[in-house]
Image: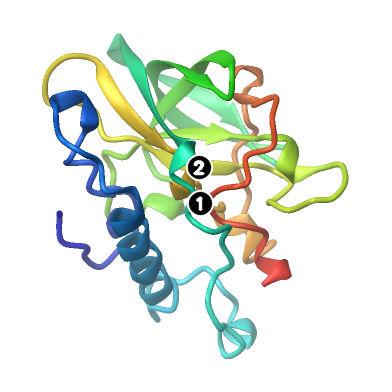
Amino acid sequence: MKTYFKGFTLLFVISMLAFNTYGQSYDCKGENAQYRNAKNIWITDSVDYPFSNGDIGDFSGLFYFPVDCKYVFTGTLSSSGALKVINVETSKGGTVQMYDYGTLSVNVKGETYHLTVYKNINLPEFKNNSKAIFIPIKDKSSGPKPKKTFANGRYVIIEPPSSGDQVVLDLNMATNPFENYNSNFSSLIVPASNMLLAPILAGERKYEDR
């Protein structure tokens, strides 16, 4: 198990070190327990937290679905090769620059997806983790009713394999953009390829529902 450490790196270097694709077991419940504890600590850090000063005193922890290991999948990661900078639209009408990393082909609840994968450049959610490889997702749990997850989607980091092309996608690790905690932030518009057809009742729920 990789040690969690200060900064958003701790959130998503999520220690997918025990890949079942390498003949080992992935400790779904153990990894998620450590991840959630680490994020609750990190998100109240006086340097990095996304909350306004008026809101931080009311923080009592984030709100998650129970860990359900049926939401752990194995997929094939295809790199785009040389990293290309692209402009990705945001919820506030602007754009931010991301690297186009490639696609993750994975079967989720009977549907095959070719999910767009980005590599971070300067998103505040990934401060101190400039090399984060992540997937923005949106699913039926975000609306229209009932809205159980953040309306603009969530982010899931994946750990590129040291060899081969098989990776673990643990949707219990889906995390909210900063915009869900503070409307002064924006979030990425989830690409059409990453719209999941089923409700994903895993990962972080809407902060306002805590």
* Quadrant showing the N terminus: bottom left
Image x and y of residue 201, in percent = 63, 46
Residue shown at 56% from the left, 53% from the top: 176
Image x and y of residue 173, in percent = 44, 48
* Quadrant showing the C terminus: bottom right
Query: How many C-alpha atoms fall within 10 Å of the one at disc 2: few (<14), some, or many (≥20)?
Result: many
Which residue is identified by label 1?
A: 175
Given residues 141 and 10, the one toward you in this image is 141
Image x and y of residue 2, in percent = 15, 54
Given residues 160 and 46, the one toward you in this image is 160
For marks 2 and 1, give the CA distance. 5 Å
Query: How many C-alpha atoms fall within 10 Å of the one at disc 1: few (<14), some, or many (≥20)?
Result: many
Q: In the picture shown, does residue 3 fall above or below 44?
A: above
Q: Is residue 162 left or right of residue 203?
A: left
Q: In the picture shown, does residue 141 fall above or below 192?
A: below
**Extreme-right residue of the structure:** 145
The image quadrant that residue 89 belongs to is: top right
Q: Is residue 27 left or right of residue 153?
A: left
Q: What is the number of the mark on residue 155?
A: 2
Which comes sooner in the sequence, label 2 or label 1?
A: 2
Q: What is the number of the mark on residue 5?
A: none
Image x and y of residue 13, in percent = 26, 48
Residue shown at 66% from the left, 25% from the top: 195
Label 1 amino acid?
A: Thr
The kind of secondary structure element at disc 1 is loop
Residue shown at 44% from the left, 71% from the top: 43
The kind of secondary structure element at disc 2 is strand
Q: Are the residues at dot 2 and dot 1 in contact (C-beta closer than 8 Å)?
A: yes
Label 2 amino acid?
A: Tyr
Given residues 140 and 80, the one toward you in this image is 140
